[in-house]
Image (tube, rainbow, N blue to C red):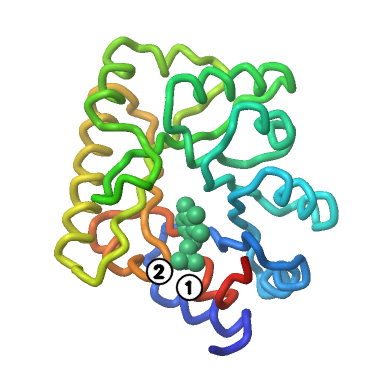
Amino acid sequence: MGTIADNLARIRQTLPEGVTLVAVSKFHPVEMIREAYEAGQRIFGESRPQEMVAKWKVMPDDIQWHMIGHLQTNKIKYIAPFVAMIHSIDSWHLAEAIDREAAKVERTLDVLLQLHIAQEETKFGWDAVELERFLREGMLQGLSHLRIRGLMGMASLTDDTEQVSGEFRRLHETFVRFRDQFLPAMDTLSMGMSGDYPLALEQGSTLVRIGSSIFGERQY
Ligand SMILES: *Cc1c(COP(=O)(O)O)cnc(C)c1O
């Protein structure tokens, strides 16, 4: 494993034009974020609100912080004033709560709707049928402090590349369908992590969330 700057350069070379790289810095110290920052990286992903706030306070203002982890409603208020994008809206209850907290700080937040695409039960996310119902009824579009930019999904953790590709392909199909039917402004499809992002890119990902291939293994 090279330096953080080397890793970033290597990964950036593999990303097509127009694909956004979120450097997932969760569980890594600010020194490592600073190294990535000095190598030009400006978008970082975190999974826990308190950790994101602590890092936001000490790091430069031009960083865009993306919340990629499961979010509890009582934690939204900590990140609402500054978060650049929330990837992990997985229920109507959470969508409403984020809308409310965004209104309080007079912001309109860029958000993604997380779909459950993996076979594992453990992963979070909306069921596509249920999400479609909320879109068909115009419920999500009615939340005026959310700007729904797209969808996010996590594929199964498996070596079976056919399965992973299939999950990404279906997410892309759902993205296109929902965009054409309900949300013409959607422009972001967040899929792909260190282990599977090349497959995600093949299936039309516009944003990859990469942690360990940049920063190494996490110390939990
Ligand atoms: C941790 C995490 C990642 C990054 O995973 P790596 O395998 O380290 O690249 C991406 N997306 C989400 C939602 C995560 O929680």
User: Which residue has dot 2 on it?
Assistant: 15
The residue that appears at 72% across and 75% down in the rendered structure is 35
Q: Position of residue 175 (x, y in %)?
A: 27, 38
Can residue 10 be spotted in the picture? yes
Label 1, residues with CA under 10 Å away: few <14, some 14-19, many ≥20: some
User: Which residue has dot 1 on it?
Assistant: 12
The residue that appears at 54% across and 89% down in the rendered structure is 1
- Contact (CB < 8 A) between labels 1 and 2? yes
Can residue 187 be spotted in the picture? no
The residue that appears at 41% across and 63% down in the rendered structure is 193
The residue that appears at 62% across and 80% down in the rendered structure is 4
Asked if ligand 1 lies within 8 A of label 1, the reply is no
Label 2, residues with CA under 10 Å away: few <14, some 14-19, many ≥20: some
Q: How many marks?
A: 2
Quarter of the figure with the C terminus? bottom right
* Amino acid carrying mark 2 in the image: Leu
Secondary element under disc 2, as helix, strand or loop, is loop
Q: Position of residue 72 (x, y in %)?
A: 59, 33
**Image position of 161 with respect to 1: above or below:** above
* Amino acid carrying mark 1 in the image: Arg
Q: Position of residue 199 (x, y in %)?
A: 27, 66
- Residue placed most toward the observer, 70 or 79: 70
The picture quadrant where one finds residue 7 is: bottom right
Residue 205 appears left or right of 214: left
Q: Position of residue 201 (x, y in %)?
A: 30, 62
Secondary element under disc 1, as helix, strand or loop, is helix
Residue 148 appears left or right of 205: right
Q: CA distance from mark 1 to mark 2?
A: 5 Å
**Image position of 109 with respect to 31: above or below:** above
Residue 112 appears left or right of 204: right
**Image position of 193 with respect to 100: above or below:** below
